[in-house]
Image (tube, rainbow, N blue to C red):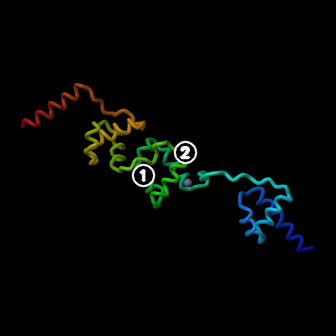
Amino acid sequence: MARRGILRSKEDNLIKDLRRTTLSFKKLGERYGVSRQAVHDFSKRQGIKRPVKPRGHQTEGCRLCQKLIQISKKPHSEFISIHTIIEKTGVEPRRKYLYHLRTLRDKGLVDEQFGRLLSKRAEKAYAIYFKKRLPIGMIGRKVGLKNFPSVVRRHRQLGWNVPTSLYVYDGKKRSRIQSEIQRRKQR
Ligand SMILES: [Zn+2]
């Protein structure tokens, strides 16, 4: 009788696992010390409807995905380079990130552009661009990225959300700058 009681409680647990988890019959068999077939037959006899295993990567339970989502919520997060993202999340091989980023993009949980910026210099340049009223070319020279104006142009063409420069290129200022340059050349 006592033995039967033990089996009964084991059965109850198995029923719970069958109803609540998506573990395979094989895995459950290993857990309860019976064959895969025995678990299958038992499940059928009990008329248990098993939950459907969700497809693809489960981002809710993934710490890396959650961390990536958190970073992506910062303003202008698409202009954070992949190097900085990796630094913020911890040391991992880069190819691992691609999988999680792709999943998050596919699910619409992060921006399509998030994690695509490769250049740390471009990240630095953009950080200045968003904050300071400086000509784009000057920002590029500051961070050692001479082609920053064309980087900005290309990103715009690709549909990145690059806000307008805080620096106003009006004709007056430009001519003042140019005459300044002329004056320096003449010296
Ligand atoms: Zn993930």
- Left or right, residue 162 beside residue 12: left
How crowded pointer 1 is (Cα within 10 Å; few <14, some 14-19, many 20+) is rated as many
Secondary structure state at the residue bearing disc 2:
helix
Give the image quadrant in which the ligand numbered 1 is located.
bottom right
Residue on which the image places disc 1: 82
Q: Residue at x 49, y 42 (%)?
A: 111
Secondary structure state at the residue bearing disc 1:
helix
Q: Which three-letter amino acid code belongs to the residue tagged 2?
A: Asp
Q: Residue 21 shows which numbered tag?
A: none
- Left or right, residue 154 beside residue 7: left
Quadrant hosting residue 169: top left
Q: Residue 106 shows which numbered tag?
A: 2
Q: Residue at x 61, y 52 (%)?
A: 56
Q: Residue at x 77, y 72 (%)?
A: 33
Q: Residue at x 72, y 61 (%)?
A: 24
Q: Residue 59: horizontal and vertical position, in percent?
A: 59, 51
Q: Residue 152: horizontal and vertical position, in percent?
A: 34, 39
